[in-house]
Image (cartoon, rainbow, N blue to C red):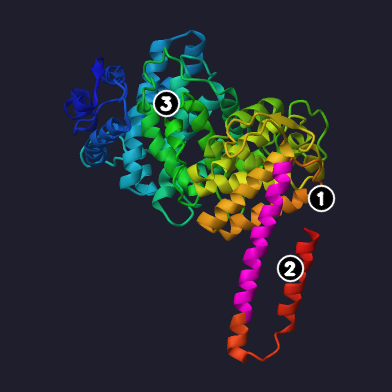
Amino acid sequence: MGANTSQVTDLSDNASLKALVGTESISENDPFWNQLISFTFVSPTNSGDSKLLEEAVIPLAKALIQNNPRTGNFGALVRVFLGRTKELKISTECQDQLFIWQAHNALFMIRCLVKVFIREMSEEELHQQFSYQERAPGSCGESGSEDLLEELLLNLVHLIVEVPLLDLTYSILFEAVTTLLTFFSYQLFHKEILQEGLIYQHIMKGRCLELTSRLVKTLLYNFIRQEKCPPAAHIFEPKAEGGLLYGLASGVASGLWSVFTLGGAGSRAGTDQENDPLPLSNQSLLLLLVLANLTDGPDWPNPFRQAITCFRNTQDTSALPVELPHTFQINFNSLYTALCEQQRSDQATLLLYTLLHQNANMRTYILSRTDMDNLVMPILEILYHVEDRNSHHVYMALIILLILTEDDAFNRSIHEVVLKNISWYTERSLTEISLGSLLILVVIRTVQFNMTRTRDKYLHTNCLAALANMSAQFRSLHQYAAQRIISLFALLSKKHNKVLEQATQSLRGRQGDNTALPDYVSKTHIQSHGFSKWG
């Protein structure tokens, strides 16, 4: 790298990078660092080129792992970046693009190296890589009291919460969020939940703790603002199939997402997400979900989950009877709008589920909205296209409906909202239908899809539970919805009677044809016919 434009093919022969990973120590005050971090990298135009970049970084990182205990060059690079972060706010106010650009480049290099380090070594060994300093022969190569790893994590959090989001700061804020995600990727290489790790301890209990509410609030506002990557930011410019930084980050992000979804792959619609021009918004949401889902410690709760569960509306002026830890206020209307607009992605649906399930203030606000169709319609569309979504996305959408249908006021109000010309519902032309009737149609379609394809008993149970929740408030149903309810009942009755007949034959086969059937079989048979009569 250096002052010129760099490409993936240039990395192995780059003199500056060779010096960084070589056997000679470089003082953090050496002019070499200004040259090293003054580069413009030509962004790969597809995921294949991004993979080439990662492969090109691996031998450089391994060489640094071998030589860093003697040279301390990695620690010097980190200190060069930390020195620049102290002046980032001033640089932003002064529109000093060169300074911000160099700070971004230094952080980008740190993240690329750390990503390889994490794959190659334990947290303790990673911590040592941060602690090595230049040493004379025969002397100790580790620093004294300074914990450079904690200092870096703290500075990244400070950078995210203090540097304003502008065109010239977009790339470095994106890089800071993605670097924190990279540090948390240690969990991907361990089956057991990491509770005692250094990174976990620094974030959950260290000096970062006092910034918990500000970090959660900033990440939420990044999601709310949905800022597109500015075209002038040539350092990170998304191309047809994902830019350099987004391409590299997507591997870590999708891996972390698989932790949330118990190993499930992304939806088929994920290809569209790769072209999404909202990388900072998406990465901020992923980091927020990672933090909120960290496991509680043995004697302390997860502060980020506390912040997620207790934040309030900016319009709420009531005093709290007890001051909750890490609480803050945020504009609920803006958050609600963003949630409605972004339900096409797994992570936005997971955030909505998390808020409905854990934040009573947000749940009450959502249920009080008079425009619930803006939220419910994207959820129904997810269920309608069940064959194109991964099972975890479908589950979350269904559980969200289950939570909503537990509220009687919601069940009444959805029959008062009239919709026209539902373009994505293609099985039948619906020129005018209530939201409640459409919800019934989509849930029944999901039940029938599950019965013929996936045969998942939990999906089946939750769909029927949602219908049962709504049933007492059915009003003025569309004739097609009423017809589908009857058809579903006929199908379920047929399957029930078939199972009952098989059970009866099995009992007779064991006990003899003339043996009277047990009472429970007769009662079940009577109940099924009684229910059929009711239907």
Mark 3 or mark 1: which comes first in sequence?
3
Q: Quadrant of residue 372?
A: top right
Q: Secondary structure at mark 3?
A: helix
State the image quarter where residue 270 is shown: top left
- Quick one: 474 or 39, which is closer to the camera? 474
Q: Give the percent coordinates (x, y) of residue 503.
A: 62, 78
- Per the rendered image, the range of residues in magenta is 479-504
The residue indicated by pointer 2 is 528
Residue 206 visible from this viewpoint: no
Q: Of 518 and 478, which appears nearest the observer?
A: 478
**Sequence-wise, which precedes: disc 2 or disc 3?**
3
Residue 317 visible within the image: yes
Q: Quadrant of residue 68?
A: top left
Question: Spatial distance from mark 3 to mark 1, Cα to Cα?
Answer: 61 Å
Q: Which mark is residue 82?
A: 3
Q: Amino acid at mark 3?
A: Leu
Identify the residue shown where x is 51% and y is 37%. 286
Secondary structure beneath dot 2 equals helix
Left or right: 79 in relation to 464: left
Residue 472 is a magenta residue: no
Instruction: Decide which of tag 2 and tag 1 comes sooner along the chain.
Output: 1
Dot 2 crowding, Cα within 10 Å, few <14, some 14–19, many 20+: some
Q: Amino acid at mark 2?
A: Ser
